[in-house]
Amino acid sequence: MGGLGKTTLAQKIYNHSAIKTHFAGLAWVSISRKWQTDRVLQRILICLVPENKNSILNMETDKLVEYLLQI
């Protein structure tokens, strides 16, 4: 249901300094109604390892999952 403030609440938690100190990396990814697994994984990985963007964009879904589990 739209307009209840779910995204606003999630953003406040995501951006809170106390939260950021507990994690080595953070990724903010918006997911639409028509989402694709590989696109979501790519966006997460690019947030976490931006220097590997080109190789991430060329990976198959199974490789993206493996890579995410490694980091």
Image (spheres, rainbow, N blue to C red):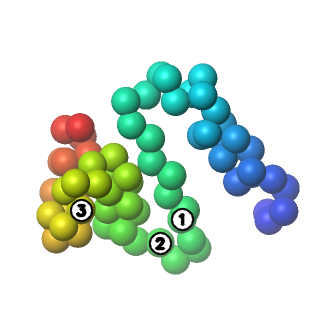
Residue under circle 1? 31
Disc on the earlier residue, 3 or 1: 1
Residue 35's disc number: 2
Residue at left 19%, top 38%? 70
User: Can residue 41 be seen by looking at this rendering?
Assistant: no
Depth order, front residue of 9/20: 20
Residue 69's disc number: none
Residue 28 position (above or below residue 2): above
Residue under circle 3? 53
Judged from this view, the residue extending furthest toward the right is 4
Mark 1 residue type? Ile
Residue at left 47%, top 72%? 35
User: Can residue 36 be seen by looking at this rendering?
Assistant: yes
Tell me residue 67's x, y (percent).
Answer: 19, 48
Judged from this view, the residue extending furthest toward the bottom is 34
Q: Separation of disc 2 and disc 3 at Cα?
A: 20 Å
Residue 17 occupies quadrant: top right
Q: For the residue carrying disc 3, how many other residues have a C-alpha within 10 Å: few (<14), some (14-19), or many (20+)? A: some
Q: Separation of disc 2 and disc 1 at Cα?
A: 6 Å
Residue 45 position (above or below residue 12): below
Viewed as shown, does residue 20 lie left or right of 69?
A: right
- State the SS at label 1: loop
Residue at left 23%, top 38%? 71
Q: Are marks 2 and 1 in contact (CB under 8 Å)?
A: yes
Q: Separation of disc 3 and disc 1 at Cα?
A: 19 Å
Tell me residue 9's x, y (percent).
Answer: 74, 44
Mark 2 residue type? Trp
- Of marks 3 and 1, the one in the foreground: 3
Mark 3 residue type? Lys
Q: For the residue carrying disc 1, how many other residues have a C-alpha within 10 Å: few (<14), some (14-19), or many (20+)? A: few
Tell me residue 31's x, y (percent).
Answer: 54, 65
Depth order, front residue of 62/49: 49
